[in-house]
Image (tube, helix red, strand yellow):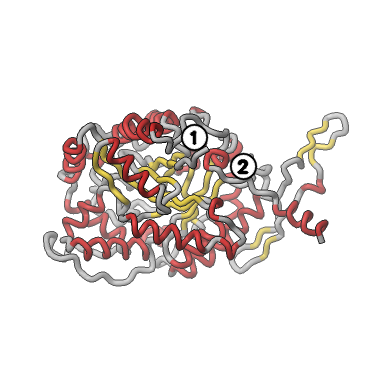
Amino acid sequence: MSKKLRLGAFLPGAGQHVAAWRHPDAASSSVFDFEHYKRLAQTAERGLFDAYFLADGLSVNFGGDDAGRRDRSTGFEPVTLFSALSTVTKNIGFIATASTTYEDPYLLARKFASLDHLSAGRSGWNVVTSTDDATARNFGRAQQAVATDRYDRAEEFVDTVTELWDSWEDDAFLRDKASGQFFDPAKLHPPHHKGKHFSVDGALNVSRPPQGYPVIVQAGQSEPGLELAARTAEVVFTAQQSLEDAQAFYRELKSRLPKFGRSADQLKIMPGVSVYVAATEREAQAKLQQLNDLIHPQAGLALLAGLSGGTDLSQYPLDGPFPELPKTVGWVSRQQMMVDIARKHSFSIRQLYQWIATARGHWTIVGTPVQVADQLQLWFENEAADGFNVLPPVLPGSLDDFVDLVIPELQRRGLFRTAYEGKTLRENLGLARPENQHLLVRQDARAA
């Protein structure tokens, strides 16, 4: 069987483009309309996507929007939404973002284990450390911690959560009505975790998730982020603009796996891609131009502020050169990418936010179904991607376009599935189910 690419669908509210909500066909009033998200999930499942992904923030002005021009100020908590969507779908996975900086390991482990049970093994956790000062202030802090401190906490956080998911062996619950034995105490393993950041002295009060662990996803591109991903992540969402940059990232991250005893196929790298597709290239370009014409300058500046650690760019001329930026303790990798794009293309501030507005710094493809598939195939077959996290510009229309136009072309080339291979998110991504760490210790002891 030939290798197949993997696809995630990043489907927030009205779409990925910063002006998506202003598009005449956008579902801009559907941020809290369950039927809207139900339609998106079922369309993505019709397209045989591996997973529905949602990012998440913990402040109203997440991303630097203080002028009320952008639509990302509010939204559902992802695990809550996905729990509901799991009841109206059968195969698609659900990857929810949750922060290691502001969550608690026990509560997070319980929440995601519950989602995995409710969805019959279709959950994933996107591990983030949170980045902006607005979020920090909502949790009693003056400003965000530096990246090294946040990732130090994240390392222990992930370990603590997996210990909690392994509190129970898979066959611990006997439910023997005749004997009155509900579970086997020998198969209960409270973590008794005592570390630098966390202390947990009791078992999780949810049985082991159907997948063993929900799929662990990560998106950081800083040095500590790469190390965390190489040790713990099973899927990495990333942002690159060129084949060469994507290849460099892919090879660098995969090369780090062996020192953690991992092989290349244990980690799927999925760059983000926003697709503007139509029957002709001219029509596809018109779709992009229509959205760019709807960008309000304040919304464009807020977008850049969110990617540059809150830097106020309104003091500079919109059509002047992009200025030097102060270093941030937040979105270090994304800020550098933004600066690199501006320097490479000699962009003004306005030109940069128009470029980034298409997908917030992710790769953008504009063209016919054949042209889009050509580009995806090029990256997939040349060590740049194991698949893609698709970011539709406007919802629901752009998702419909991708499912109806691009998916059939990928299938025609033998690059994408024609039916789901398994029942769980792990099975469809081609990821092994992890053994309970207590069984591994027992096996090692017997081998010794």
Residue drawn at the location 37% of the way across and 33% of the way down = 407
Residue 113 x/y as whole percent? 60, 44
Q: Can residue 345 be seen in this view?
A: yes
- Left or right placement of residue 211 versus residue 100 in this view: right
Q: Which residue lies most toward the right here?
A: 179
Q: Which of marks 1 and 2 is nearer the N terminus?
A: 1
What's under tag 2, amino acid-wise?
A: Gln
Name which quarter of the figure residue 114 lies in: top right
Q: Callout 2: helix, strand or loop?
A: loop
**Which residue occupies the foreground of this view, 198 or 347?**
347
Residue 69 x/y as whole percent? 23, 48
**Which residue occupies the foreground of this view, 170 or 198?**
170
Residue 26 x/y as whole percent? 26, 34
Taking 105 as reference, is 83 above or below it?
above
- Disc 1 designates what residue? 92
Residue drawn at the location 40% of the way across and 67% of the way down = 142
- Label 2, residues with CA under 10 Å away: few <14, some 14-19, many ≥20: many
Name which quarter of the figure residue 190 lies in: bottom right
What's under tag 1, amino acid-wise?
A: Ile
Q: Do the residues labelled 1 and 2 touch (CB within 8 Å)?
A: no
- Label 1, residues with CA under 10 Å away: few <14, some 14-19, many ≥20: many
> What's the CA distance linking mark 1 and mark 2?
14 Å
Residue drawn at the location 44% of the way across and 55% of the way down = 219
Badge number at residue 211: 2
**Which residue occupies the foreground of this view, 371 or 259?**
371
Q: In which quarter of the image is the C terminus?
A: bottom right
Taking 257 as reference, is 109 above or below it?
above
Residue drawn at the location 57% of the way across and 56% of the way down = 263
